[in-house]
Structure formats: structure tokens, C-alpha cells
């Protein structure tokens, strides 16, 4: 019995310790896998000497899977798919659909209630209404039978069949590409062009590394606003609000880049992206907001992959961060 209680107590303490560790990590520096990398958001960055293993996948983003480019601020709501209108005869709007549904519903419910097919029509029912119901039921049955027959027929190489599609050029820009039915890979290739990253770009990346982290440590959203995308700003703002509610401050200082190299760089339409692996040192502390008492001294060396974005000819800003495995 004592062994059972001891095991239960040990398990309870282990759970408590785990939750405490998670709570501390949630308050720590913005070491997350979040943001957008355009069409490569859900693809792993290429390994580098600084980060030779696969990076952690992005698990928080405004980019929808399959989207060509990152979701712009305010575009998430506009780009949300509208509910699909119900198909079929009885979901058609207007007088015809309402009458059909009403007549059929009345007859069927009357039959189920034991009043016969015409019983559900009530006092205003007429023989014409009954015939209309029977005709609708027969029509639906006929359509279902024809659909089943067509599904049972073997596929033939008629217009629009496999033989016709195979005869089209693989890079065809004909009407087959209209509305997204084909040409998708060619469109993506045209929107994903490698670019050259120059020494001054690497200088900008190193500068942003220090400015973003120190701005976060100082809880300066105005400083972050001009250095990160609106999406990343929303994530940082949420983390800072969480720290405030917990009575903590994540102080960050003395950021220094130790090693860095380019993973990949490309252009999509008017946007350019560059993902860079960076190993850096910093003084990262979690303290109580009111007393300044040290809660935890966090790791002093971190390796991450940062993705930067800019309009062609513009300034780089942080678009996503990922943890090196």
C-alpha cells in the first residue's frame, strides 16, 4: 500500500514539475516556430553549416496551406473561404426549390405518420399537388439511376478524358489553366525565383537580430513595429501581454552573432525572402516585474533560422523564426 501511495505521489510531483517547466518556457524569450515564409512556409529550410539538421516546422502562421504567398495583414478574413452553397435540386433558392421541398416534405411526413402520401398535405391538398410529389420522387429516382449507370460505364478517351489531357503541352498556358485547373506548378515556379544576397544584406540581418531581441526585452512594440511583419508583431505582442499578466519580464541584452550563413533566398512577385541560420549569444533573464528578482537565467547561446522579407528595393524585416533541431 505504501508503495502505491509513493508511486502516486511521485507521478503527481512529476506532473507538477512538467507544468512548471512549461510555464517558465512560455514566458521565456521569443523562441518560437512562427511566421510566414511565403510559398515555402510549410517547407523545411535547406540545412547549413550553422544549422546542419532540419529546422523545426512552423506551427503558427497566417499562411494557409497551399497558398502561393504569405497572407497579408487583414487578408486572413477576406481570404477565408465562404461556406459552399448546398447543391442539388432541393437546395436551390427561390420559389421552385421552396415548393418542391414543401410538397415532398408534406407527403413524406404524412406517409411516415400513417396518413398516407396525401395525408400530410392537409385540407388544402389537391390531386395536382399529389401528382407533383409523385413526379418529383420519380424524377429524383430516375436521375439517381442515370447517375449510377454513368458511374458504372468504363472511362473512355473522349473530350476532356485522359487522352486529350495527355495531348496538351506540359507548359501550356491555355484555357485549361483558368481557375486553377492546371498550370499550377508553372505558376509557382514563376513566382519562386532564386535571388542573390549581398554583404550589405547580411549586415542588415545581423543588425535586425540585435534590434528585434533587445526591443522584445525592453517590451518596446514601437521599436518592433518597424522591424518585423505585422504578423510577427501580433505574436510578440501576445507574448509580452502574457508576461505582463504573469508579473514577469524577459530581459534580453548583449546580443552577439557568433556564426551565420544563408539557407535560401528567393523572390515571389514583388517580395523577396531570405532564410538565414544564426548562432548567437545573449544575456537572457526572466525576472519578477515588481521586485526585479531573478526567476531564471535562460540559455546564453541559441541557434535559430530567421526568415526576412522585403519589397524589392525596400528594407528587410523579420517574417518568421524557427528553432534549429
Image (cartoon, rainbow, N blue to C red):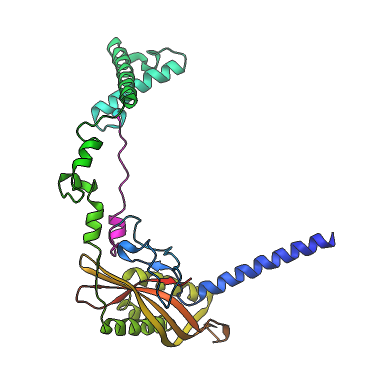
The relative height of residue 128 versus residue 192 in the rendered view (above or below) is: above
Q: Is residue 269 above or below residue 293?
A: above
Residue 87 image offset from top left, x and y in percent: 30, 34
60 with respect to 245 (left or right): left
Residue 204 appears in view: yes
- Quarter of the image for residue 141 reads top left
Q: Farthest top residue?
A: 127
- The residue at the far right in this view is 1
Q: Residue at x 53, y 81 (%)?
A: 299
In the rendering, at what x and y percent does residue 310 appear? 25, 73
Please give the name of the residue rendered at 25% of the width and 52% of the height, measured from the top-left corner.
Answer: 184
Q: Which residues are magenta?
A: 68-88
- Return the x and y of residue 228 as percentages of the image width and height: 33, 75
By secondary structure, the bulk of the magenta-drawn segment is best described as loop
- Is 139 inside the magenta-drawn segment? no
Along the horizontal axis of the image, is 230 left or right of 248?
left
Amino acid at each position: 500500500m505504501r508503495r502505491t501511495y509513493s508511486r502516486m505521489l511521485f507521478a503527481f510531483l512529476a506532473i507538477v514539475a512538467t507544468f512548471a517547466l512549461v510555464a517558465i518556457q512560455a514566458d521565456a524569450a521569443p523562441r518560437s516556430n512562427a511566421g510566414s515564409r511565403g510559398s515555402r512556409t510549410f517547407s523545411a529550410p535547406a540545412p547549413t553549416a550553422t544549422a546542419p539538421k532540419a529546422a523545426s516546422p512552423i506551427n503558427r502562421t497566417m499562411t494557409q496551406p497551399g497558398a502561393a504567398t504569405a497572407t497579408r495583414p487583414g487578408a486572413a478574413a477576406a481570404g477565408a473561404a465562404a461556406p459552399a452553397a448546398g447543391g442539388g435540386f432541393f437546395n436551390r433558392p427561390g420559389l421552385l426549390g421552396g415548393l418542391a421541398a414543401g410538397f415532398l416534405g408534406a407527403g413524406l411526413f404524412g406517409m411516415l405518420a400513417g396518413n398516407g402520401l396525401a395525408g400530410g398535405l392537409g385540407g388544402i391538398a389537391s390531386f395536382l399537388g399529389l401528382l407533383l410529389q409523385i413526379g418529383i420522387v420519380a424524377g429524383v429516382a430516375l436521375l439517381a439511376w442515370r447517375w449510377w449507370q454513368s458511374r458504372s460505364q468504363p472511362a473512355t478517351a473522349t473530350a476532356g478524358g485522359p487522352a486529350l489531357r495527355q495531348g496538351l503541352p506540359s507548359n501550356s498556358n491555355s484555357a485549361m489553366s483558368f481557375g486553377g485547373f492546371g498550370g499550377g506548378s508553372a505558376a509557382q515556379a514563376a513566382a519562386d525565383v532564386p535571388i542573390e544576397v549581398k554583404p550589405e544584406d547580411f549586415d542588415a540581418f545581423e543588425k535586425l537580430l540585435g534590434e528585434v531581441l533587445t526591443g522584445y526585452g525592453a517590451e518596446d512594440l514601437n521599436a518592433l513595429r518597424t522591424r518585423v511583419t505585422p504578423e510577427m508583431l501580433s505574436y510578440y505582442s501576445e507574448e509580452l501581454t502574457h508576461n505582463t499578466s504573469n508579473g514577469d519580464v524577459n530581459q534580453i541584452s548583449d546580443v552577439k552573432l557568433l556564426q551565420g550563413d544563408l539557407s535560401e533566398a528567393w523572390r515571389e512577385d514583388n517580395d523577396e525572402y531570405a532564410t538565414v541560420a544564426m548562432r548567437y549569444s545573449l544575456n537572457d533573464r526572466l525576472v519578477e516585474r515588481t521586485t526585479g528578482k531573478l526567476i531564471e537565467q535562460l540559455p546564453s547561446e541559441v541557434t535559430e533560422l530567421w526568415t526576412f522579407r522585403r519589397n524589392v528595393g525596400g528594407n528587410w524585416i523579420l517574417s518568421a523564426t524557427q528553432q534549429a533541431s
